[in-house]
Amino acid sequence: MGGVKRMMEEDMERGFSRVEDTFVCIRCVEDDGLKAFIKDNSVRGACSYCDGSRRVADMNDVIEHVFNSLSIEWGEATNEGLAYETREGGWQGRVCGTWELLYYHGPECSEEVFDTIVGSIHDVAWCERDPYSLPIDRTLVYGWQSFSHFIIHTARFVFYKAVNTSYAADQHDEMNPVDILETLGSVAKKLDLIDTVPTGQSIFRVRIVDPEVHLSRASELGPPPAAHANMPNRMSPVGIPMFYGAFDQDTAIRETYDPAEGALKKAATGEFSPIRDLRVVDLSRSFYVPSLFDPELQTLRPYFSFMCDFVEDFTKPIERSDRAHADYVPTQVVTEYFRHVYRTDDDHQIDGIIYPSSKTGNKAIVIFADASGCIDAGDTSSDRTLLRLDRAFDVDLADFAAGEDDDEIF
């Protein structure tokens, strides 16, 4: 077999052709993921597109990376099992050619770089991977929605054993709603959502009181005793007190203050700090979906996409009414899972959850501490102690801007 023919067969098997003596720098691409790849695979040289003398990557490596990245979510229609019926007009599903695929789903880059890539990747009919199944992120979103509906309307206290008649076990792209908790735990590990609130970090907690009321002790500014935890919250049901706080005073007040209570009220504020590092699940991160061409994060795109939807639903405002007891149940169960079941890689329990405030967008936190978990400065701590009250002070609410609604009760 001649060398040229062998090269052509290798190109066909690869799915793309090679280019000669072509190099590209990060200034000629805009996609952050592809920039990272070029940076990691660069040497000192001259860019073939802007003639700049700087660090460049071999264009063959870039083309191969783009092709392999696209192949994570897209495949050749014939290989993906997409039906083709001549009498029905051809492909029985959405397909596109290489130019269209790269134009709409490829990396942003200069026109010259784009032309090199599109001219190298063979022009075939592309379709989404596994076209007859739901994408992973949609499967997870529907799993969360099904879990929420199931636990609110069908089985609440024995949901993990109850038979869900709406779940079809033979559907490979459908998940049993009760599996969503373990899935959330797995996603937390995949996306590295376990974080630490360091010892000494200021955390503010607020109680709205009449001007003549003076609160200065941890027992007054911390979580109520279990007997007085008589209102359901997003993370905690009636009878199970938790510490709701924020990392800044403004957020703590806005999450608590209902202007309907009147401007003559004041915010009795406690500035607490952890007595040890707290292990928390951080849901306040920006769950942007990374580039398909990010060499580190590309395979995690479905999970970032799912978390965008999950956190939006997890933190959505819920009108305080008798109905709130039911609507809070899904988030309360998730909280209990992370509190009592989930373990970190080093086999530790979780101490709390950080989540975005619906009032300011800043970080709010629920810490799994009841009244016995908070002490005053100078008191002796116990195994149950998580927080110390460092300072107590009042904030006048007369001129305080009102929040949108009373979503959280701290």
Image (cartoon, helix red, strand yellow):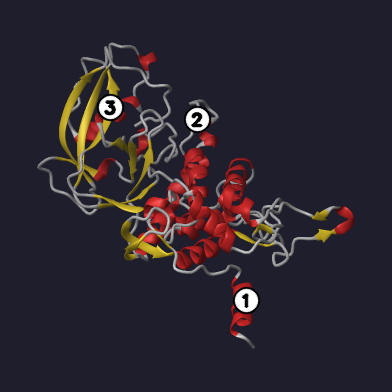
Q: Which residue is nearer to you in this view: 203 or 120?
A: 120
Viewer can see residue 159: no
User: In 3D space, how far apart are the residues under numbered discs 3 and 1 (Cα atoms)?
Assistant: 66 Å
Circle 2 sits on which residue? 318
Q: Are there few (<14), some (14-19), or many (20+) residues within 10 Å of tag 1? A: few
User: In 3D space, how far apart are the residues under numbered discs 2 and 3 (Cα atoms)?
Assistant: 21 Å
Corner quadrant of residue 185: bottom left
Q: Is residue 160 above or below residue 243?
A: below
Circle 1 sits on which residue? 8
Label 2: which secondary element: loop
User: Which of the two discs, 2 and 3, labels the residue nearer the N terminus?
Assistant: 3
Corner quadrant of residue 97: bottom right
* Tag nearer the camera, 1 or 2: 1
* Tag nearer the camera, 3 or 1: 1
Label 3: which secondary element: helix
Location of residue 293 in the rendering, given as x and y in whole percent from the top left corner: 47, 57
